[in-house]
Amino acid sequence: MRPSRMIATLGLCLAATIAHAGAPEPETRQGDFAHVCRGGANRNLSCTVPTQGSDCPGSECVVLPLSPAVKGVLTIIAHDAVTDWANGGATNQALTVMLEVRAPNGTQQMLAATYQHLADPTSAPTALSNVVAIDMDEFALANLSEAVTGLLFAQPESTLTQQLQTLFDSEGTPVLVAATDRQVQSADHTGDGLATVVRFKVKIQFLQPRPL
């Protein structure tokens, strides 16, 4: 096992122990978005989760939604041996994400993008540290298949974000607000030359970013 992969795998194991998926924890990601009191005397007033006892007496502090939840299916494909079909070779790594949703006009949309560490394609792709703080290789994805709820409050990369905002006519940030560890479909190919795949149902909601 290459040192970079070993480090990523050890990092994943630690994160899984703490948050069942790639750090940071969902509670930390949730803090990136505006919150209001669900009910009580301060209903709809601004609040924070750490101080919800004083901010929202008799109620709780929840994220401020700008839209109803949108159901979808998220497919993630990690490949640690990207091959040139015509010329062979299998040293580069890549991650493909595909989100399937139904648009407001009723059409079924498939939004997909492939990510790579362009400065060093042989290294695993990475994301912004406030979304996923570990290298996104096949080992990470194989472990994620048992803990997809660890991705709650994760937001997509900017291009996919803009496509969703345009599709649903929203200025909010699209965020994964629901995922279930039940009925997750997965294919672990960390031991061969094929890609590892995880597919599961999600709910996406547009949220208001936290005021700076």
Image (cartoon, helix red, strand yellow):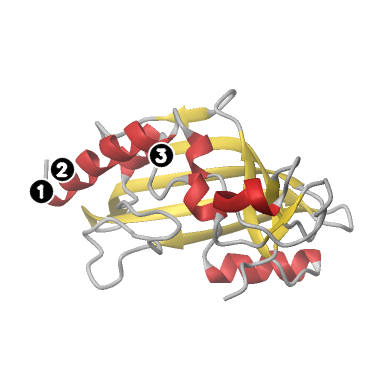
Q: Quadrant of the C terminus?
A: bottom right
Q: Amino acid at mark 2?
A: Met
Q: Is residue 200 above or below residue 39?
A: above
- Residue 3 - label: 1
Q: Closer to the N terminus: mark 2 or mark 3? A: 2
Question: Residue shown at 25%/64% (left/top)?
Answer: 121
**10 Å crowding of disc 3: few (<14), some (14-19), many (20+):** many
Between circles 1 and 3, the one closer to the viewer is 3
Q: Amino acid at mark 1?
A: Pro
Horizontal side of residue 3 vs 98, given as left or right: left
Return the residue nearer the eye: 143 or 51: 51
Q: Secondary structure at mark 3?
A: loop
| Residue assigned mark 3 | 21
Q: Amino acid at mark 3?
A: Ala
- Residue 6 - label: 2
Disc count in the image? 3
The spot of residue 102 in percent (x, y) is: 79, 50
Return the residue nearer the eye: 180 or 2: 180
| Residue 193 visible, this angle | no
